[in-house]
């Protein structure tokens, strides 16, 4: 027997409009969106009066460090935080787990660990490193969504750790990935510039947060983006630039699009919610690469977002244990613990405070990444699509406290103490509620692994 439910009285955000009405859901799929009232065969009615109904966020940049570093964040705690924040699908990065997702066997370990622990749907990226070029095809056959590499220096701790690449590996990797029909995600910072400036600062005894920001200047990001664009033209490899932090980099990518380069970009909640001055007060919990920028640079990035020049938003949720945040700002590990506050914080900042349309916001958190990565039946509220959705109260204020957060290390969030004027009140995965502000996480993990390959590892 089919299971039917209906969300009534909601402000339903579709691809083109906001419809004040009802959504009928049958067997996990959206059946219709209309102003019709529930009929007798509906099993469950949820009143969303005064709230927006948004497509569930698709977070394309999440670091779940299981296996190997589950003490930093595992699938259970990470996916609970994602679900509580309105994310219904995420893609896991090939680092910082051990081993790095650089081979089919490493991917299998990920799949095995994830299979019974996820509250949101999920998929995996494969790594591009100097020593795994011969593994790219097997990873594609096993179902990775795309590949990820670092142009900046990654400080490997063990032989199984992630490794940054040189230009030769980038060129050869892009040629192979283009031939496999995949996308390459790239962390764009010039390693020689950032490493050299950091060493110079440390030798001078300059170890404030401002010194860290200055050691990773916008020019290092822009140069690396420029290099990637040139390589993409030569190889015809589709590329996606992750966590873009500067207006200049955004404009360079927009110009490349106009020239026919197959390129997209994301930016992250923290670049809009905080800046270098906030970093000074927060310290290591707000350390990330590229760093938080100065206020004038942050404002320029805001204008890029509002103008529609940024393709989508992600969290770059990259947690670690509190002990690794100790020491001076160059010694402590980078990475923002923040995926639970993607939707509410950015909605408040972008829609409530800066006038972004709710339709544009839905595209930034769901529709655009779903299209880029060909995620089936996800990313919009329309008949036939999965009923992955968020209930969001646009005027319910609250202050973030550690006890609200589901992370392995909630006190690592830089957003603690921040007042947000919007709140996620419910999250639904294929029509089933997985989070409520009244009940917390609901039920057992129901997240499913999806992949692009018919021969994917099960």
Image (spheres, rainbow, N blue to C red):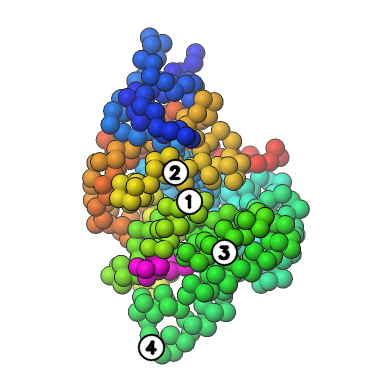
Magenta-span inclusion, residue 178: no
Q: Is residue 438 left or right of residue 127?
A: left
Count neighbours of disc 1 (C-alpha within 10 A) and say few if under 14, some if 14 to 19, many if 20 or more.
few
Earlier in the chain: of badge 4 and badge 1, it is 4
Give the residue pinned by disc 4.
Answer: 205
Magenta-span inclusion, residue 294: yes
Give the residue pinned by disc 2.
Answer: 360
**Residue 95 image-quadrant placement:** bottom right
Rounded to the nearest whole Å, what is the CA distance between mark 2 and mark 4?
A: 45 Å
Location of residue 377 in the rendering, given as x and y in whole percent from the top left corner: 56, 33
Rounded to the nearest whole Å, what is the CA distance between mark 1 and mark 2?
A: 8 Å
Give the residue pinned by disc 1.
Answer: 308
Q: Is residue 215 left or right of residue 265?
A: left
> Tag 4, which secondary structure?
loop
Give the residue pinned by disc 3.
Answer: 252
Earlier in the chain: of badge 1 and badge 2, it is 1
Q: State which region is magenta.
A: 288-298
């Amino acid at each position: 027997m089919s299971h039917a439910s209906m969300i009534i009285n909601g402000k339903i955000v579709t691809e083109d409009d906001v419809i004040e009405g009802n959504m009928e859901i049958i067997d996990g799929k959206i059946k219709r969106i209309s102003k019709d009232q529930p009929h007798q065969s509906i099993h469950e009615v949820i009143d969303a009066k005064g709230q927006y109904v948004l497509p569930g966020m698709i977070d394309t940049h999440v670091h779940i460090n299981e296996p190997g570093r589950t003490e930093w964040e595992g699938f259970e705690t990470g996916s609970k935080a994602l679900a509580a924040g309105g994310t219904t699908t995420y893609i896991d990065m090939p680092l910082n787990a051990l081993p790095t997702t650089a081979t089919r066997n490493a991917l299998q370990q990920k799949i095995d660990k994830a299979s019974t622990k996820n509250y949101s749907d999920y998929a995996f990226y494969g790594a591009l490193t100097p020593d795994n070029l011969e593994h790219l095809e097997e990873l594609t056959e096993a179902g990775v969504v795309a590949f990820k590499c670092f142009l900046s220096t990654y400080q490997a701790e063990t032989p199984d750790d992630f490794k940054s690449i040189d230009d030769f590996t980038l060129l050869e990797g892009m040629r192979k990935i283009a031939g496999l029909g995949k996308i390459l995600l790239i962390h764009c910072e010039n390693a020689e510039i950032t490493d050299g400036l950091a060493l110079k600062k440390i030798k001078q005894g300059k170890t404030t947060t401002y010194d860290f920001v200055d050691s990773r200047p916008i020019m290092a990001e822009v140069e690396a983006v420029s290099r990637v664009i040139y390589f993409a033209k030569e190889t015809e490899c589709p590329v996606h630039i992750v966590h873009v932090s500067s207006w200049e980099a955004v404009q360079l990518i927009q110009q490349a699009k106009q020239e026919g380069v197959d390129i997209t970009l994301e930016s992250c909640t923290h670049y809009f919610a905080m800046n270098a001055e906030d970093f000074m007060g927060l310290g290591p919990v707000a350390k990330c690469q590229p760093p938080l920028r100065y206020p004038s640079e942050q404002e320029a990035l805001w204008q890029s977002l509002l103008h529609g020049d940024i393709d989508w938003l992600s969290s770059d949720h990259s947690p670690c244990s509190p002990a690794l945040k100790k020491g001076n700002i160059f010694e402590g590990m980078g990475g923002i613990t923040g995926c639970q506050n993607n939707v509410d914080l950015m909605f408040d900042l972008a829609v409530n405070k800066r006038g972004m349309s709710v339709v544009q916001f839905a595209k930034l958190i769901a529709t655009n990444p779903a299209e880029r990565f060909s995620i089936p039946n996800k990313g919009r509220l329309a008949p036939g699509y999965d009923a992955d959705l968020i209930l969001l109260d646009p005027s319910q204020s609250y202050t973030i406290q550690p006890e609200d957060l589901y992370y392995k290390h909630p006190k690592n969030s830089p957003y603690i103490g921040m007042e947000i004027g919007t709140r996620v009140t419910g999250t639904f995965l294929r029509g089933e509620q997985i989070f409520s502000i009244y009940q917390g996480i609901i039920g057992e993990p129901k997240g499913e692994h999806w992949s692009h390959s018919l021969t994917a590892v099960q």
